[in-house]
Image (cartoon, helix red, strand yellow):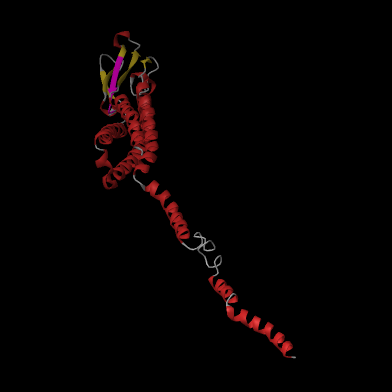
């Protein structure tokens, strides 16, 4: 019986799924740059660039000075990493919803869950699918996060500005984006994969395939042993009811040995010489 163990797995699965999509889907960050032009009046020492989930960075625009009079240029970050981020968050949301539904079924509908073995079979297939999706989604998001870090690196963003290509101007990063929550989301993604993969074994035992695989060999051995027990070998035919301990034929022959015919013949053979001697 695995339902208590499966139910105990659902609580950390629920929590880790919440942490996964909350740390990724709820992220918002930014960086700050400084452009110090040769003409100080044209400088901008506080250029703020904000970005957030789903990390369509090519849509993030910001203004930067050109250090050529009052003219400014509009630039945008490079890259679109929404596919891996949205895929990761979608897996986390659906995993959370399924785990919540499975918990309700485990607690309130155990009989329906075991009926015709359909519930454990569906649960096993879904668990395998989610384990695979967590592995793929976490790996894809880890690669996407690496690309996001590169695209939002202040030193890389400064290279996009025309003013920073002139040696007379000084361009410096003021603040880098904080990525700790995104790093945490990747960790929770792989932790979810470990939990779902570990839960495969317990759900597999619920399907009955594991127990049926171990039950058939003992059944055949029991059938063989029962056939021997019911056969003539273990009923001790050599015991009190057997023919060898009570050899009826030999007993009857012994009775013949006690019958008077042969005894009378012996007496006759013994009385013959006596009567002959008396006649002489």
Give the x, y percent position of residue 256: 57, 76
224 up-or-down from 253: above or below = above
- For image coordinates 59% across by 74% down, the residue present is 258
Q: Nearer the viewer, residue 232 or 182?
A: 232
Residue 53 in the magenta stretch? The answer is: yes
Characterize the magenta stretch by its predominant secondary structure. Answer: strand
Residue 72 placement: quadrant:
top left
| The C terminus sits in image quarter | bottom right
Q: Residue furthest top?
A: 40
Residue 166 placement: quadrant:
top left
Give the x, y percent position of residue 278: 73, 87
Residue 65 showing in the rendered view: no
- For image coordinates 70% across by 87% down, the residue present is 275
Give the x, y percent position of residue 268: 65, 84
Residue 37 in the magenta stretch? The answer is: no
Q: Nearer the viewer, residue 105 or 274?
A: 274
- For image coordinates 61% across by 81% down, the residue present is 264
Give the x, y percent position of residue 246: 54, 66
Residue 12 placement: quadrant:
top left
Image position of 95 (left or right of 229): left
Q: Residue furthest bottom?
A: 280
- Which stretch is magenta? 47-54
Q: Nearer the viewer, residue 177 or 228?
A: 228
């Amino acid at each position: 019986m695995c339902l208590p163990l499966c139910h105990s797995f659902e609580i950390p699965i629920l929590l880790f799924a919440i942490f996964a999509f909350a740390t990724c889907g709820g992220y918002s960050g930014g960086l700050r740059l400084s452009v110090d032009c040769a003409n100080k009046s044209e400088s901008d020492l506080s250029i703020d660039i904000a970005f957030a989930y789903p990390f369509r960075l090519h849509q993030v625009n910001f203004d930067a000075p050109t250090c050529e009079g009052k003219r400014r240029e509009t630039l945008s970050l490079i890259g679109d990493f929404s596919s891996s981020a949205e895929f990761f968050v979608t897996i986390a949301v659906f995993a959370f919803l399924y785990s919540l539904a499975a918990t309700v079924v485990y607690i309130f509908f155990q009989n329906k869950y075991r009926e015709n073995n359909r519930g454990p079979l569906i649960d096993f297939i879904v668990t395998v699918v989610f384990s695979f999706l967590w592995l793929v989604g976490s790996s894809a998001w880890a690669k996407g996060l690496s690309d996001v870090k590169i695209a939002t690196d202040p030193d890389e963003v400064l290279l996009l500005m025309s003013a920073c290509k002139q040696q007379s101007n000084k361009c410096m990063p003021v603040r880098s984006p904080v990525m700790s929550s995104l790093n945490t989301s990747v960790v929770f993604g792989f932790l979810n994969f470990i939990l779902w993969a570990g839960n495969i074994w317990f759900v597999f035992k619920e399907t009955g395939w594991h127990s049926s695989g171990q039950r058939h060999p003992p059944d055949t051995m029991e059938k063989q042993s029962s056939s021997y027990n019911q056969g003539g070998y273990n009923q001790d035919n050599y015991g009190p009811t057997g023919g060898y301990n009570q050899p009826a034929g030999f007993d009857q022959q012994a009775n013949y040995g006690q019958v008077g015919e042969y005894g009378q013949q012996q007496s006759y053979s013994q009385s013959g010489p006596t009567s002959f001697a008396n006649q002489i």
